[in-house]
Amino acid sequence: SQQGEEDPQALSIQEGENATMNCSYKTSINNLQWYRQNSGRGLVHLILIRSNEREKHSGRLRVTLDTSKKSSSLLITASRAADTASYFCATPTGYAGNMLTFGGGTRLMVKP
Amino acid sequence: SAVISQKPSRDICQRGTSLTIQCQVDSQVTMMFWYRQQPGQSLTLIATANQGSEATYESGFVIDKFPISRPNLTFSTLTVSNMSPEDSSIYLCSVQEQGSNYGYTFGSGTRLTVV
């Protein structure tokens, strides 16, 4: 079963606009991770936010985490056509916390 | 970070046959993970592969259908056996390098189509 739900499922924006994706999860977590997948290929790790962090930045990416609401958001600022991809949140689960459970993903299209 | 070489990148197979997918990591890792991504869906963990022991399968996945080998700390294979069109998916391997507070590295995926 999936740990997280993401919304929106699909998002289409113009180049230069900001894109915001949201993720909700169900259980307590140590961290939450965001990944990008281009055209059904392998996933690329974007950013990890720990449970004691509320916000984290990496280049044009900003991630927030609200553990009281069990939710996270990924903001991509000044989007580019190359940002077109699917974005997934994932949380470590399992008895040792070493397997990832993924959200449903957001398909982002950035129009040039 | 680790680099994973996964192959084949894609294949079209006849139903009833089997396909073995390989993942080679450029460093030693304790655990390797195999995921399935059905068309338009998110990733679902198939199994966790440890060197020297049998893989641990998630609910809904069985060893007879998805046998896994892990002969050493840098290599693993996943076989999709007796394939049917429902097995058409992207299969990905993954490793976690430095403990639970670091991200995971994924192979480039194998896009399998069963006809």
Image (cartoon, coloured by chain):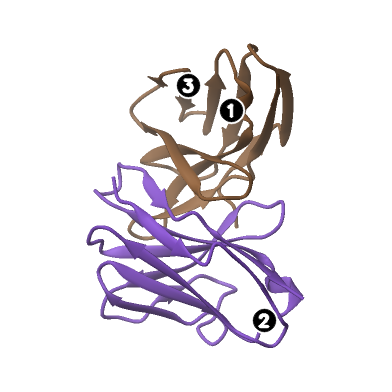
- Crowding at dot 2, Cα within 10 Å, few <14 / some 14-19 / many 20+, comes out as many
Residue designated by label 1: A83
Locate residue B19, reporting x and y percent.
57, 79
Residue designated by label 2: B83
Dot 3 amino acid type = Leu
- Crowding at dot 1, Cα within 10 Å, few <14 / some 14-19 / many 20+, comes out as some
Chain B colour as displayed: purple
Labels 2 and 3 within one chain: no
Helix, strand or loop status at disc 1: helix
The residue located at (72%, 37%) in the rendering is A9
Dot 1 amino acid type = Asp
Labelled pair 3, 1 in contact (Cβ < 8 Å): no
Quadrant into which the C terminus of chain B falls: bottom right
The disc at residue A61 is 3
Labels 3 and 1 within one chain: yes
Answer above or below: position of B56 versus A100. Answer: below
Chain A colour as displayed: brown
Mark 3 or 1 closer to N-term? 3
On screen, residue B13 versus residue B49, left or right, reads: right
